[in-house]
């Protein structure tokens, strides 16, 4: 008796091809939904006076990242059954408002910190104030990463998303450290290259964020959903 032939599209190579295809499509959609306002950011000089404009231009990034999180989380492993575009736009419609409720305060916080650090010498404040601002910015970014993942994958009220995102900073330290690594990578790419390069690898960073956030996602699903 012969063994059944494996169905096309589910082998290791097919799964790898499906992942690459999905990431490429999601990356194109992220660029499509963010490039019109990110172009000015790339063209602006890295001057403190441009921080408010850069923050304003960054606002569409939140819903785009949320849609990418949704699409990559729900992606199909079968090469013959891929619908990343449908998943992306579904996630965008479902989560845009929730993502903005997370993203807007985060962008405002980071912009305020950046402006204060840029004008630190003129502020006439103690030297320890600068490291504290950096700590606040990092903590805010890590909270924002948790909140964006939660609001993209689950249906919670905004206040519950905020509380869970804060709670999981300490509950899942492995995820927090992993997200910190993603944050460091994003900052390094921006500093060493440009915002344009960061945008080009956005979907890859989102995929890594999903992987590092897996302990939090599993715990939310197990303990906070029916």
Image: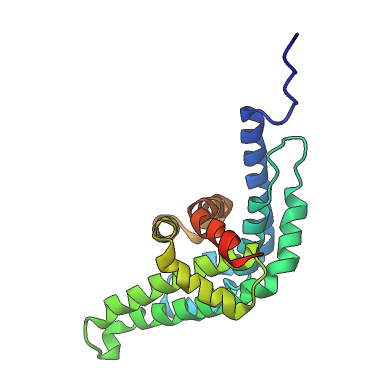
Q: Nearer the viewer, residue 56 or 6?
A: 6
Give coordinates of residue 201: x percent, y percent. Answer: 54, 51
Q: Quadrant of residue 118?
A: bottom left
Identified at 72% across, 14% down, the residue is 3
Tell which residue pokes out farthest to the left in this image: 127
Q: Is residue 70 left or right of residue 183?
A: right
Q: Nearer the viewer, residue 59 or 3?
A: 3
Give the colouring mode of the picture: rainbow
64 over 80 or under it: above or below: below
Give coordinates of residue 173: x percent, y percent. Answer: 39, 60
86 over 112 or under it: above or below: above
Q: Nearer the viewer, residue 3 or 153?
A: 3
Q: Quadrant of residue 104?
A: bottom right
Q: Is residue 135 left or right of residue 64?
A: left
Q: Nearer the viewer, residue 125 or 4?
A: 4
Identified at 64% across, 77% down, the residue is 157
Give coordinates of residue 93: x percent, y percent. Answer: 75, 67
Q: Is residue 188 visible?
A: no
Q: Quadrant of residue 142?
A: bottom left
Identified at 75% across, 52% down, the residue is 85
Q: Is residue 162 visible?
A: yes
Q: Is residue 144 left or right of residue 88?
A: left
């Amino acid at each position: 008796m012969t063994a059944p032939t494996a169905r096309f599209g589910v082998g290791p190579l097919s799964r790898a091809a499906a992942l690459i295809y999905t990431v490429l499509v999601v990356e194109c959609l992220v660029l499509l939904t963010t490039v019109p306002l990110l172009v000015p950011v790339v063209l602006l000089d890295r001057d403190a006076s441009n921080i408010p404009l850069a923050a304003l231009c960054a606002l569409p990034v939140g819903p785009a990242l949320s849609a990418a999180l949704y699409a990559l989380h729900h992606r199909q492993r079968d090469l013959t059954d891929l619908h990343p575009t449908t998943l992306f736009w579904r996630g965008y419609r479902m989560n845009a408002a929730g993502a903005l409720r997370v993203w807007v305060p985060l962008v405002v916080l980071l912009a305020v910190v950046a402006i204060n650090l840029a004008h630190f010498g003129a502020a006439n404040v103690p030297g320890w104030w600068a490291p504290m601002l950096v700590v606040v910015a990092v903590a805010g970014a890590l909270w924002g990463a948790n909140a964006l993942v939660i609001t993209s994958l689950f249906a919670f009220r905004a206040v519950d998303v905020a509380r869970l995102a804060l709670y999981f900073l300490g509950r899942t330290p492995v995820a927090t450290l992993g997200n910190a690594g993603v944050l460091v990578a994003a900052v390094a790419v921006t500093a060493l290259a440009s915002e344009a390069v960061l945008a080009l690898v956005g979907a890859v960073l989102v995929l890594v964020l999903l992987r590092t956030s897996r302990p939090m996602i599993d715990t939310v699903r197990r303990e906070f959903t029916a």
